[in-house]
Image (tube, rainbow, N blue to C red):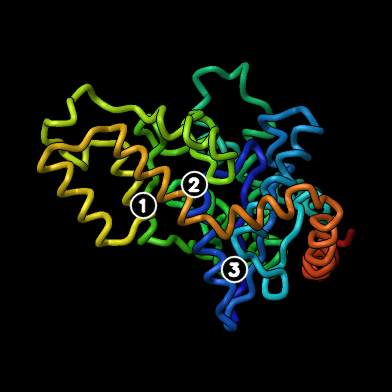
Amino acid sequence: MNRILTAVQCTGDLHLGNILSVIKPTIELSKNANNEVLVFIADLHTLTSIKDPKLIEENLYKAAIVWLSMGLNIKNTIFFRQSKIKGICELTWIFNCLTPYPMLANAHAFKDKSNNLSDVNAGLFDYPVLMAADILIYQSDLVAVGKDQKQHIEITRDIANSFNNTFGKIFKLPDCLINEKVKIVPGIDGRKMSKSYKNTIDVFAEENILRKTIMSITTDSKTPEEPKNPEECNIFNIYKSIANDSDIEYLKKRYINGGLGYKEAKDMLFELIINTFKKEREEYNKIKNEIEYIKDMFIIGEEKAQKIADETMKKVKNLLLI
């Protein structure tokens, strides 16, 4: 049995990139009886960038609704809120006392913002240690992450090794689970789709808002009559992340042969998203205001996650004599 862990922050609405790179692959993993899958919403991590508790709570429930609308089944998945699990922050402190400063100073999350240290809080600097506690407290075998998180798993393994060698072997050394088939989904400006770039597509938005987002995708100034290179077009690159092979090939030929305007291509992308996520959009609208239902889903998962965390922390405290 493989215990697989993944998480998402609640810094904003989950978008098409999150769905294709994290949510759908994780749900498929949970359907395998040989996997025990844990999914949590990382509300503690979110505090490094958002300080409004009401906004964090709002984003948390929105994230949960997206997961459930996409087909997450809590019968074969442990689904919970990070902050509700006792022991996470305590284990983070213990790991802090084993983690050398240079290791954190070389972490990407810190280095990307180190040119302006006044904007870096201790939580951001310490992000990899909290992530290590999140992973190790559940004795995870595999951590489903994107390629940009690989370094954090390496740090987690180093911290686990340090603890095991110092106090006694408790923690498993988790491996990355990176879905190589999932490519980076481009945003409406051509960069990686990311909440921090404000270039995302919310597939659960109201139709008029979704259409407005699609119509704002950046393009060049070529006329409809001109042949175009589809691989250089943001519309096509988003389209091919969702469509089947035959539809991709059809649209590709239309780009190359000329006669396709960007307005028509955007209309095709809009229709593709509406049709692809029709069932999920209906489920989203059905449960989006059922906050008590979402809380009940979380409580079921939190009881299971807490049991695993308690077992780990009991071993840790026995070794540390605390």
Q: Which mark is residue 4?
A: 3
Quadrant occupied by the N terminus:
bottom right
In space, the residues marked 2 and 1 are separated at their CA atoms by 9 Å
Relative vertical location of residue 41 with respect to residue 202 in this rendering, above or below:
below
Q: Quadrant of residue 166?
A: bottom right
Relative vertical location of residue 37 with respect to residue 9 in this rendering, above or below:
below
Relative vertical location of residue 278 with respect to residue 310 in this rendering, above or below:
above
Relative vertical location of residue 82 with respect to residue 138 in this rendering, above or below:
above
The amino acid beneath tag 3 is: Ile
Name the residue carrying label 2.
Answer: 16
In space, the residues marked 1 and 3 are separated at their CA atoms by 25 Å
Residue 53 appears in the rendering = yes
**Is the Cβ of the residue at disc 2 closer than 8 Å to that at disc 1?**
yes
Q: Residue at x 35, y 37 (%)?
A: 266
Quadrant occupied by the C terminus:
bottom right
Name the residue carrying label 1.
Answer: 241
The amino acid beneath tag 1 is: Ser
Marks 1 and 3: which is nearer the front? Answer: 1
